Image: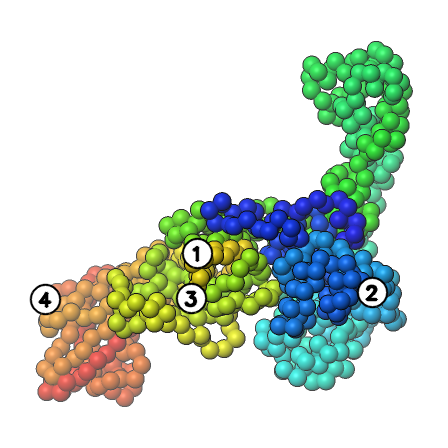
Amino acid sequence: MRFTLTRSLRWLAVAALATGCADATDTPDAPVDNDPPVFAGVGVKADGFALAPEGYEAEAILRAANTLTLAQLDDDAALDARAARNIVAARDANGPFDSVIALDDVPYVGQRAFSQLLSYAERQGWIGHCGDGVINGGEACDGGDDCDASCGLDVAGGPTGVFVHGVEEGTYAALGLLAAANTLDHATLDDAVGLDARAAQAIVDDRPFANLADLDAASYVGERAFGKLGAYAADHGLVPACGDGAVQPGLETCDDGNTADGDGCDATCGGEDSTPPPAGGYDTPVVHGVHEGTYAALGILRAANQSDLATLDDVIDLDVRAAKAIFYGRQANGEFGSLADLDAASYVGADAFEKLLAYAQTNALLPTCGDGVVQPVEETCDGTAGCDASCERTFHCGDGVVEVGEQCDDGNVDADDGCSNLCQWEIARSDGSNRTYETALEIGTYTHFTGNFSARSGHHYWTFTIDRPSRVSIDLMGYSRNEPITRAQFEAGAVPGAPNQGDGWSIGEHDVPNAFHQSIAFWRWYWDDRCSSSGCSLPDYNSVKKYQKLDGPDYTRQLAPGTYYIGFHTGAGNSNYSPSMSYLGRLIIEPTGDICGNGVVDDGEACDDGNAIDGDGCTRACDLETRTESERNDDLESADPLDAFRLVRGTNTAGDADWFVFHVADGWLDARLRGTCPFDATFALYDDAGDLVAEDDDGAGGYCPALALEGLSDGYYYLRIAHADARIAGGGYLIDIQR
């Protein structure tokens, strides 16, 4: 359902901040005459406020804010003079507003200003609509043979027998390939899909494409681009399929969101004969001709549950015995929960139902589409994004594809997993207690986190845990502030309270720009040589902590399994005021390897010893650890034990021989030097009794020794490494001993 801002304002008094209320010590009082915000500064709509960040109304508001002069904003649009001045000042300083989120952050600009700007835009005829010949936000097209009545591409479905670079027009594969070409931005086409940059630009310039032939006509697009687009679509859920809830013309005659037979739509989405729904179209019990759970049923129950005895008797005109049964029954047992419960009351029947329904209709007691409350029997949504005029969803939440009206889609309709059952973000919210590493709040399964704090005491910490190697990125998606901020940064580190010891990494922006979805560049930081981890004698903080922006546009980090911390800090340069900040962050975790510690060496792992412990030869990130020799290990009796270590590093001096002992359980051994041979080394292997088992000088080629043995008995073995000429020092080496 599309609600206009004007209509929404009639419903809304004052919207609560999406970030919630900060504790009293952290947030100064806002000016009482400030215009209540629309998005609360964090990109989240206020409760009941139905303006979407993108759409016809948002575009019209931006047009007014970006083009009107100060006099027009003040007089013609009738804005508060302070709002008008601040809009023009922000425009002059930063250029036109690129989103209504940014506009909403301007002081004294909020619900009232938005309403006035929208009213002005309506008077000027600036609010777009499907069919006006202009492709507005949320439209794939506007006009033309391939554009349908809702400004979506009207593509004929079904296989055509025409192949373009091996892909048949009208098939699932073709639809997925077109979805990738029509929806992915330039950066994704260039980097993630791997297209030639010229092909990526041509696609963005020429789209939308109605068929593969149109796409193939774009410059620099050919067989190679088709292959990469098709592979990306298949890997990222862009290829439609039977069971995704969307009917593909020519390929499917139905699609009920599953591939089960016997439910009206079979496993191939070819349709089945089914029993028509009950009279009235609702599959619920019927009491005196009214279906349970419908608008009518709920209206009857409201009339029965909310009316006093006099109203039931005189106004609704029930039989006095029925009126008393309803009134006194309610007092004794509570409100009636269903039509069946109400019908069980004495003297209540079809006549009473008819009169209660008539009263409910004339006294606005019936629920309606548009009242903001979802009535499950008659509605699938009400007032939310992606909800049409009949309270039916216009998207298919849970299919794994983010569609118009969805903020997310994780492939299910479960709650409390970061993406709600309506495919809207679920946000972890700070209660103000997370001011230290020790009290950091878990982000858990959520992808978004938000909070509000005072800059002079501004520290918020969040924590997250990954169980496998992952690429992690953190975005600052939105924020609001009452006063200027002198410093803001994010930090993340694996060691609580001690990132200055080299165990952490940092990302940050100083003097955060007033922009929505501003990606934060990664920074690394270090300490001045004159400081130690325990303190510093330098008086100037900025001379102690130094920042270096990392090269390149990559805002992600590859992290090993473990627990990490995100810290958000602000600093005020003037002690006379205490700024406050609210923020919305987004944490994106993309696993790049299997779970470390499962005992199986998966792709991306060098080892896996079945645990997440360091110091045993295989790290918690499933990387090999190196044991360093300890002198004196010059004979069998003083050999260094390797335990589970596979790599050992040492140094061979003149006349020196280094010995190592380890267990062989599976009967085979492979020992060799890693890298190029640093010197003419020799290997000798001895059993537990000290008897020579095998030796080698240059089995790996050149001066490189190697031992590759099978059929060894279970037991302990000793490996000796020395220079072939005992008079010469060998130098450093790294031995790889697999067994």
Depth check, mark 3 against mark 1: the one in front is 1
Q: Amino acid at mark 1?
A: Arg
Q: Earlier in the sequence, mark 1 or mark 4?
A: 1
Amino acid on which the number 2 mark rests in the picture: Trp
* Earlier residue among tags 3 and 2: 2
Which is nearer the eye, 539 or 726? 539
- Secondary structure of residue under mark 4: helix
Cα distance in 3D space between marks 4 and 3: 48 Å
The circle drawn on residue 637 is 4
Q: Residue at x 65, y 57 (%)?
A: 108
Say which label, 4 or 3, has the lower sequence index. Answer: 3
Q: Is residue 520 above or below residue 599?
A: below
| In this view, 43 is above or below 298 | below
Q: CA distance from mark 1 to mark 2?
A: 44 Å
Q: Does residue 329 sit above or below 502 in this rendering?
A: above
**Secondary structure under the numbered disc 2 in the rendered image:** loop
Give neighbour class at mark 3: few <14, some 14-19, many 20+ (Cα, 10 Å).
many
Q: Which mark is residue 126?
A: 2
Q: Can you see residue 666?
A: no
Q: Residue 733, percent across and down?
A: 23, 79
In which quadrant is the C terminus drawn?
bottom left
- Which residue, given by chain and number where applicable, does mark 3 sit on? 506
Closer to the observer: label 4 or label 2?
A: 2
Residue position marked by numbered label 1 in the rendering: 456
Q: Nearer the viewer, mark 4 or mark 3?
A: 3
**Given contact means CB atoms under 8 Å apart, are the residues at marks 4 and 2 in contact?**
no
